[in-house]
Amino acid sequence: MSVSPKLRLAPSRCEGYSSLMPVDSEGKNSSKHFEPSWSEIKARQAGELTRGSSHWDVLLETAVDAELQAIRGRIHFISGNLHRLSGWIFLEWSEQEIESRFSGFSAQDLWNLLKSLGGD
């Protein structure tokens, strides 16, 4: 699904990645707490992390942000009854762009993110 832009989005660069951030008319960050409706959420199995006896399923969740006319994404890590969840770290015009950004993460990047979320 691709969504056309409605609000002005400014480029942001971090560790070689380029993303979009919502800004107001003065160029200041205008991000708000994002709570998508259940009907707007999509998730897919994106891989597995295994190290020794530790095993985590990795899921990529996307949801339409109607206010921004864009797509947001975040990563879930699931191991048995344990669930770790990133914030909405992706903001792009389409799901394909989010999947492309996600594919740029190495296994080590995902382990580092999981560790920052209190996992292994």
Image (cartoon, grey):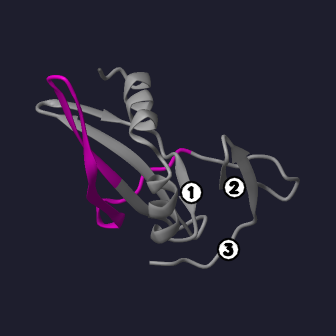
3D distance between C-alphas at marks 1 and 3: 14 Å
Tag in front: 2 or 1: 1
In the image, residue 18 above or below residue 39: above
Label 1 crowd (10 A; few <14 / some 14-19 / many >=20): many
SS of the residue at dot 1? strand
Residue at the image position 47 percent from the left and 70 percent from the top: 96
Q: Is residue 113 left or right of residue 97?
A: left
**Residue topped by disc 3:** 6
**Residue topped by disc 2:** 22
- Quadrant the N terminus occupies: bottom left
Q: Is residue 114 left or right of residue 10?
A: left
Earlier residue among tags 2 and 1: 2
In the image, residue 28 above or below residue 81: below
3D distance between C-alphas at marks 3 and 2: 10 Å
Residue at the image position 61 percent from the left and 79 percent from the top: 4
Can you tell which mark lies on residue 91? Answer: 1
Look at the numbered discs 2 and 1 and tell me whether their residues touch, using CB distance below 8 Å: yes
